[in-house]
Image: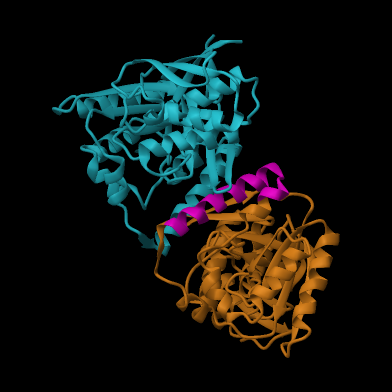
Chain colours: A cyan, B orange
């Protein structure tokens, strides 16, 4: 195999209660990449469509993760990468993670899969770090493993796959405003009340349990964030209106996707998920803010080989 | 049925990472109670063996929880309670919880089980509050439900039963020193670093996942407490020596049981658990502190009817 075309999915990090550790993978929404072997060693980004991103491999998220992989694998050939970017950078649904993970997933396939998914995440973290200034895996893990993931630790890197109930759908709204990840980080307190932390870890434990036993009601009761949301929701206009509309329309829960500005809702069944979409559209369509919305199943596969 | 004899088990709260929410139930170690119907309405404690505790129902933990139950059930008869107390008050393995839970469990049986386990926990919390000055359920839940439990919330009371791997054994050491629950509470910080909280909720999520999938290695990796242990371990002489000895002897993890002074270890298999017991005995037998130790399987049943 000399060439591969892959789909690299968008993802939702944090999932309300699980700041910095939980994430899930979206279906249908994501980037595409074509990667092919080249005689010349190295990583060459030959095409970028969709958004204006650097072509120099060491300045491009997909390039940096690919470079980290080939530095370890040392193949006696190189790779050229075509990036068809559909996830807007800065949207809060793992745009840089899709870039960072896509290139290493594709190269691993072309090399005959010498690396497992955790190792691929490790290389992808190098690319993710270029975008967000720190190594984290809460979007990379669901992109690479699929479904719900828990990043138990970064060093050593340890990723757990949590079961995904079959009838779980996500509704996403992406308001076209800029929330800088650095600002979203800076707004957070360094210290938090112990009582809030206890509430949060009860919810994390309860959500993991609920996902194992397919208990949608318990999923709903667990999707609360008493720590991050009170701060970051200030950066997202109409967040509370969207959340209320979403819950009133039957969503199991609603929260900030990653560091925002996208907002996710989870629902049981595609029909409820579409009702939620209508409800949150109604909030934003009366504002001057441009936005887009979509509904999708949780993607339990993660990366996909298209051809 | 006019009389019942029950076994009310000792329990371990917190389980390293799950302060205030997680707990598990011990086997063989616990109190016994005989409860019988009386023509006269009310709760009458007629016998207490083992430790010196008040006979007045409204000053006795088992009495207060029983009073809370009959205030709701309003039976046209009463109950007398004989308490055979084996769990030393203040030992950190749920002595007051065993008292509070035992009486309501027994009375519920004599009434024909009008209440479910969550409702029994609710009544038992009234007794527990007499002992610890605040309503909590992290020892009551495992005593009443058995196995591993997660108290998702107190108000409304919501208790989750987490699966218990079959080959999990606990080793307990109880140093005969006094650690006042009030002091153990007062020593804790009101605010904690966000980064520590993230580590803790990753471990809670990971432990719940590990218990679901019977992954002993992951149980081991999850049994860490970066928040409470650094403070409370100061109140327990030789805690770190016991922990090191326990882990070196093969324990999966080791931590403070409840608010101490007891220390628990979890091991895969009874043999490792006994090796851990020998190792921690060796730490304490060179000190002037009296102590006792025991090994037991995790009790997945909780309360038991003896006759």
Q: Is residue B42 shown to the viewer in this render? A: no
How many marks are shown on the rendered structure? Answer: 0
Residue B27: x %, y % from top left? 77, 64
Q: Which residues are magenta?
A: B195-218
Q: Is residue A287 above or below residue A225?
A: above
Note whether A201 is above or below B74 in the view shown.
above
B233 part of magenta stretch: no
Tell whether A198 sits left or right of B176: left
Q: Quadrant of the C terminus of chain A?
A: top right
Q: Position of residue A264 (x, y in %)?
A: 36, 33
B227 versus B221 height, above or below:
below
Q: Which residue occupies the foreground of this view, B121 or B20? A: B20
Give B230 or A219, whichever is nearer the viewer. Answer: B230
Residue B139 to residue A62: above or below: below
* Residue nearer the viewer, A181 or A120: A120
- Measured as percent of width and height from the top left, residue B10 is found at 69, 69
- Locate residue A269, reporting x and y percent: 46, 24
Predominant SS along the magenta part: helix
- Residue beneath the point at 49% across and 80% down: B182
Q: Determine the residue positioned at 49% across, 29% down.
A: A67
Quarter of the rendering containing residue B142: bottom right
Residue furthest to the bottom: B288
The magenta stretch spans residue B206: yes
> Is residue B197 left or right of B175 when viewed as pictured?
left
- Residue B222 in the figure: left or right of residue B9: left
Q: Residue at x 59, y 36 (%)?
A: A118
Q: Residue A245 falls in which quadrant of the image?
A: top left
Name the quarter where the N terminus of chain A is drawn: top right
User: What residue appears at the point 22 percent right and 29 percent down from the top-left corner?
Assistant: A283
Q: Is residue A18 visible?
A: yes
Toward the viewer: B273 or A168?
B273
Q: Residue furthest left?
A: A288
């Amino acid at each position: 195999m000399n060439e591969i075309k892959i789909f690299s999915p968008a993802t939702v990090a944090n999932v309300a209660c699980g700041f910095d550790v939980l994430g899930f993978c979206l279906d249908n929404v994501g980037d595409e990449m074509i990667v092919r072997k080249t005689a010349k060693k190295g990583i060459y980004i030959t095409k970028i469509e969709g958004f204006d991103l650097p072509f120099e491999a060491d300045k491009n998220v997909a390039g940096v993760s690919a470079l980290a992989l080939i530095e370890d694998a040392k193949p006696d050939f190189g790779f050229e990468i075509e990036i068809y970017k559909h996830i807007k950078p800065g949207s809060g649904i793992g745009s840089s993670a899709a870039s960072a993970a896509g290139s290493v997933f594709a190269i691993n396939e072309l090399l005959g899969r010498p690396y497992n998914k955790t190792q691929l995440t490790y290389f992808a973290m190098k690319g993710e770090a270029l975008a967000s200034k720190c190594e984290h895996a809460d979007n990379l893990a669901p992109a690479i493993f699929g479904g719900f993931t828990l990043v138990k630790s970064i060093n050593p890197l340890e990723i757990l796959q949590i079961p995904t109930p079959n009838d779980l759908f996500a509704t996403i709204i992406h308001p076209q405003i800029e929330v800088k990840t650095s600002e979203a980080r800076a707004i957070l307190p360094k210290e938090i009340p112990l009582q809030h932390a206890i509430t949060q870890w009860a919810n994390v434990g309860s959500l993991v349990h609920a996902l194992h036993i397919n208990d949608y009601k318990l999923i709903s009761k667990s999707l609360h964030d008493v720590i991050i949301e009170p701060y970051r929701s200030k950066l997202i206009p109409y967040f509370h209106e969207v959340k209320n509309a979403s819950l009133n329309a039957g969503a199991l829960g609603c929260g900030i996707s990653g560091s925002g500005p996208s907002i996710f809702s989870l629902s049981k069944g595609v029909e409820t998920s579409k009702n939620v979409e209508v409800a949150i559209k109604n909030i934003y369509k009366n504002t001057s803010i441009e936005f887009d919305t979509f509904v999708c199943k949780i993607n339990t596969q993660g990366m996909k080989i298209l051809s």
